[in-house]
Image (cartoon, rainbow, N blue to C red):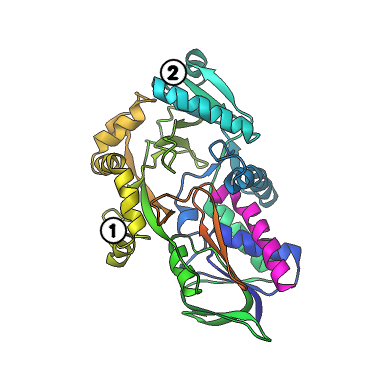
Amino acid sequence: MEDVVVIGAGIVGLATARALLLARPGLRVVVVDKADEVGAAQTGHNSGVIHAGLYYAPGSLKARLCRAGATATTQFCDEHGIPHRTVGKLVVATDPTELGRMEALHARALENGIPVRRVDRAELAEMEPLVTGLGAVHSPATGVVDFRRVARAMADDVLARGGSVRLRSAVRAVQESGGSSPGVDVETDTGLVRARYAVACAGLQADRVARLGGLDVDFRIVPFRGEYYQLPLDRRPVQRLIYPVPDPALPFLGVHLSPTIDGRVTVGPNAVLGLAREGYARWSLDPRDVASFATFPGMWRFARHHVRTGLAEVRDSISRRAYLQRVQRYCPSVTLDDLRPYPAGIRAQAVDRSGTSVEDFLLRRTARQLHVCNAPSPAATSAIPIGELIRDEVLAAIG
């Protein structure tokens, strides 16, 4: 029997397995995942930003763990020879409404203990000559990295410390048992894994795996496609990450310009309702995934609250010209010819029965299971302290 089985070889699952092995050498830990490689889903399809922690509600898990995670991530990269760069971020206001939101964002960042400062129009022009705005919040500590490379290094670390990682091992059943020999049986495509405790970090399949484990699932994972473009390699209009001021009613940060660790500049993502949880190709459709959110009352309530935004996202997904207009609000020099194809990502966003998107990280538990049910951005940045938080609960449970 294993001590712990971790379902999901994304960055959060791998960070959890690593944290367990660091704390208790010799622990029998196995990670299972249906993919052919680690970090294949959300971990490998994002902007590659090491977030400083500006946006999150004070006192929330996101606020606390993102701040700790930014430090832990850069330290892990330094220890493992993974390139990363602190480029800084400007959150740019382009109209009076956004200026008011920017002030609220600045106050929230300070309350979270994040070093930020206001930048006026003149200084913004000095810092980024091709960026236009009424003002901005500058976060000098925000950085960039390739999170898929981080995940691979974590997997190597798990293996080096005696753990195992089993790929192509989709989970089919989860059965918790009590009595004199409590534990969890996890049936996978490559065989049965019996463990004293199970941790599920299943991302886009979090609700389904939780249901397999017998939990009362009162939320639904809704996939939102994040579509990106990249600029030509000889076009680098910005040196820093350039973000719009986000709409506080939505869990998305808006279409932004992101210098990447490999020298590109990406544009995006948007946030259009996805028709397949893991369909990264354009126009991907999975009827089972569509039925999952279409039959959930909370999704209809969410949709009613955000009809205008949802339609705008569809328009921008279909029309490159409309997408471009979002970028030109703060960087007018970007042209239609500059928008080159780039792989999309898919965000796993939990929505509850009331129609509210779950804002914070969400953990659910049974006697022998812990499920990470909502872990969108900044989960990649926060992965190491999330893993440590889970580690403490698991070790307390198994003794």
Q: Nearer the viewer, mark 1 or mark 2?
A: 2
Q: Amino acid at mark 1?
A: Ser
x 48%, y 60%: residue: 203
Q: Tell whether position 397 is magenta.
A: yes
x 40%, y 20%: residue: 96
Q: Is residue 44 above or below residue 37?
A: above
Position of residue 345 measured from the top left corner of the image (x, y, whole percent): 40, 51
**Closer-to-camera residue (36/295):** 295
**Closer-to-camera residue (169/244):** 244
Task: Decide if residue 169 is in sight here.
Answer: no
Q: Is residue 49 above or below residue 236?
A: below
Q: Main secondary structure of the magenta part?
A: helix
Task: Decide if residue 190 is in sight here.
Answer: yes
Q: Is the C terminus in the top left, top right, bottom left or bottom right quadrant?
A: bottom right
* Element at label 2: loop
Q: Tell whether position 91 is magenta.
A: no
Position of residue 181 measured from the top left corner of the image (x, y, whole percent): 67, 85
- Please give the label number shown on residue 373: none
Residue assigned mark 1: 284
Residues shaded magenta: 379-399
x 54%, y 52%: residue: 361
Residue assigned mark 2: 134
The residue sitting at the front extreme is 354
Q: Is residue 169 above or below residue 228?
A: below
